[in-house]
Image (cartoon, rainbow, N blue to C red):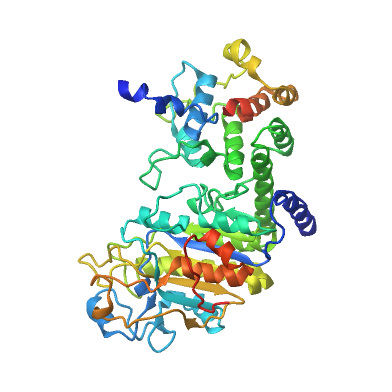
């Protein structure tokens, strides 16, 4: 494990400047719900499948590509924005208890949070700031932020 | 948006998409759809060597009898599941079968050989996984609108010039991102390298949804709605009639090691669905069929003898299909040998007498009027075979 995480190749996988679907979905969820335990992983699995990086769904033995270009196709980008909307618009069933009959635990993806204002906001380009300024609701703001080029990196 | 607007939009944007390309390139007005049967379909039970006693001897449980098979010529018969769909096309001279077709890849591994076909590179040389042959084809054509009807961008369309959009064709719903959001998102990406991919993604999404929802409004009056590949193929037909002209789709479920059935059974059902899909595609594309070519390929054939589980195992040579309104079909094309024990490859399966690259190269050369140099860029180190299919 030590050899693995200290290998230059390990660090290099983050230098592509573009998150693959697994990193994209998990980073969005961590930012939205950090510290809370997700009760229902069904939606997460669904998003990964939709973005073409489903768990154990790779058909060839070479594994999912680490080259960012493999995830930047036009169809993949529009699918990613759809997922951004689903994550940004509400809890999406992530806090539905396994027992079924109980109601979902209350939750909202709060992306305009401390992390955003203290750290991430400074890195936004003017185009993204301009788009975020036109958001008409917190859900809309979330969707746009998750769809932004800065969040994709 | 009506059809004229859609075409106008396509033409306008098409120009900007190909701005960086050479305009001397030949016509892409012809349409090409490549259908990949992943899992290696049992070609010998679909295009059946009815003239071979050996076939009936080594497939006691699986063989399709001479009575059941639909005669194609003196030596060959077609699986009865294709009676109402592919046989009529063959009878009209719009379908040809190329037996003993395949690759020189001998791994008999699905993954290896599918990659081999999609990459279209020389076997044995080091592979460039970022250069599929349809992407290289798209780079040779002008006015080309390529699309992969798959969930992920397949190897076959990777690399080349402009990124190729992919769109899973089943389960298309109304997009959740509305027009206002799409505009804002596109604006965020305007000055980034992803600007083209983002705007192309929204455009393809809208075209696909438009085409499919318009149709749903007018049709389906109580009729059984098609499912599975037939549904996909009909949608592809509408999209390729109006918008796209270079398409790829894959169909899985052909790896029949166990209980594949004969005239009826599992393989017969899969084939029936494939046949209905292609017939539906032809119906939807309408007059466009005359300049459309559909090629059906699979990574390899299967063992000529049945195995102990009433199935067949990984083999070598397959049978490829070439269909189209302008195809010179109604025949079995390419070199053939007798389907007997002496002519089996490694005493196991069909030999490859027609290399898939030569077959496709010859076809592409005629379809698009591509010269030798262009064909060599698509299939390096390969000579086209002229089977006079177009």
Residue at image point 69% right, 41% down:
B199
Q: x, y percentage for residue B53?
A: 27, 85
- Outermost bottom residue: B74
Decide which of B344, A94 is in the foreground and name it.
B344
Q: In which quarter of the image is residue B109?
A: bottom left
Q: Is residue B188 visible?
A: yes
Q: From what the image shows, is residue B56 above or below residue B138?
A: below
Instruction: Identify which residue is drawn at 67% across, 22% down.
Output: A138
* Quarter of the figure with residue B41: bottom left
The percent coordinates of residue B143 (x first, y second) are 70, 58
Relative image position of residue B44 (x, y in whole percent) = 35, 74
Residue drawn at x 39%, y 83% is B76
Q: How many labels, in total?
A: 0
Q: What is the x, y in percent for residue B335?
A: 41, 80
Horizontal side, residue B151 vs residue B344: left or right: right
Question: Does residue B208 appear to the left or right of A133 in the view shown?
Answer: left
Query: In which quarter of the view is residue B6 placed?
Result: bottom right
Q: Is residue B86 above or below residue A102?
A: below
Q: In this view, does B314 lie to the left or right of B222?
A: left
Q: Is residue B84 visible?
A: no
- For this rendering, which residue is in front, B375 or B118? B375
Farthest residue in the left direction? B308
Drawn side of residue B190 relative to residue B270, left or right:
right
> Which of the two residues, B55 or B348, is positioned nearer the viewer here?
B348
Quadrant where the image shows the C terminus of chain B: bottom right
């Amino acid at each position: 494990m030590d050899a693995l995480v200290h290998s230059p190749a390990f660090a290099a996988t983050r230098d592509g400047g573009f998150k693959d679907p697994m990193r994209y979905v998990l980073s969005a969820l961590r930012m939205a719900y950090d510290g809370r335990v997700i009760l229902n992983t069904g939606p997460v699995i669904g998003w990964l499948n939709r973005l073409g990086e489903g768990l154990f769904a790779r058909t060839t033995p070479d594994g999912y590509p680490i080259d960012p270009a493999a995830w930047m196709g036009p169809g993949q980008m529009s699918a990613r924005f759809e997922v951004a909307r689903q994550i940004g618009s509400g809890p999406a069933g992530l806090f539905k208890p396994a027992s079924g009959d109980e109601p979902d635990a209350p939750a909202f993806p709060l992306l305009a949070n401390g992390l955003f204002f203290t750290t991430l906001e400074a890195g936004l380009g003017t185009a993204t700031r301009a788009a975020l300024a036109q958001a008409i609701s917190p859900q809309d703001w979330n969707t746009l932020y998750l769809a932004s080029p800065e969040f994709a990196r | 948006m009506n059809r004229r607007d859609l075409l106008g939009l396509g033409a306008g944007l098409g120009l900007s998409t190909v701005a960086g390309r050479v305009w001397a390139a030949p016509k892409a007005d012809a349409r090409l759809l490549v259908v990949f049967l992943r899992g290696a379909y049992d070609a010998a039970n679909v295009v059946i060597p009815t003239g071979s006693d050996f076939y009936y001897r080594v497939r006691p449980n699986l063989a399709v009898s001479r009575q059941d098979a639909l005669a194609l010529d003196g030596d060959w018969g077609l699986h009865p599941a294709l009676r109402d769909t592919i046989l009529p096309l063959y009878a009209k001279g719009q379908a040809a079968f190329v037996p003993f077709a395949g690759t020189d890849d001998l791994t008999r591994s699905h993954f290896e050989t599918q990659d081999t076909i999609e990459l279209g590179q020389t076997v044995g040389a080091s592979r460039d996984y970022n250069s599929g042959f349809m992407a290289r084809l798209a780079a040779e054509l002008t006015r080309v609108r390529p699309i992969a009807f798959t969930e992920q961008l397949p190897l076959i369309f990777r690399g080349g010039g402009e990124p190729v959009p992919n769109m899973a064709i089943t389960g298309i719903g109304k997009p959740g991102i509305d027009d206002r959001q799409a505009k804002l998102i596109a604006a965020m990406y305007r000055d980034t390298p992803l600007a083209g991919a983002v705007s192309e993604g929204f455009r393809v999404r809208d075209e696909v949804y438009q085409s499919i929802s318009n149709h749903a409004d007018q049709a389906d009056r109580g009729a059984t709605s098609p499912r599975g590949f037939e549904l996909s193929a009909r949608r592809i037909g509408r999209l390729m009639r109006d918008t796209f002209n270079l398409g790829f789709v894959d169909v899985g479920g052909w790896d029949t090691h166990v209980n594949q059935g004969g005239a009826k059974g599992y393989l017969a059902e899969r084939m029936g669905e494939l046949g209905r899909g292609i017939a539906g595609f032809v119906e939807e594309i309408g007059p466009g069929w005359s300049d459309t070519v559909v090629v059906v390929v699979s990574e390899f054939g299967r063992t000529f003898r049945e195995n102990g589980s009433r199935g067949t195992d990984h083999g070598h040579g397959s049978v490829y299909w070439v269909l189209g309104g302008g195809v010179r079909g109604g025949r079995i094309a390419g070199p053939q040998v007798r389907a007997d024990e002496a002519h089996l490859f490694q005493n196991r399966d069909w030999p490859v007498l027609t290399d898939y690259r030569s077959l496709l190269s010859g076809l592409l050369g005629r379809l698009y009027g591509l010269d030798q140099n262009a064909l060599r860029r698509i299939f390096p180190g390969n000579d086209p075979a002229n089977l006079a299919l177009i």
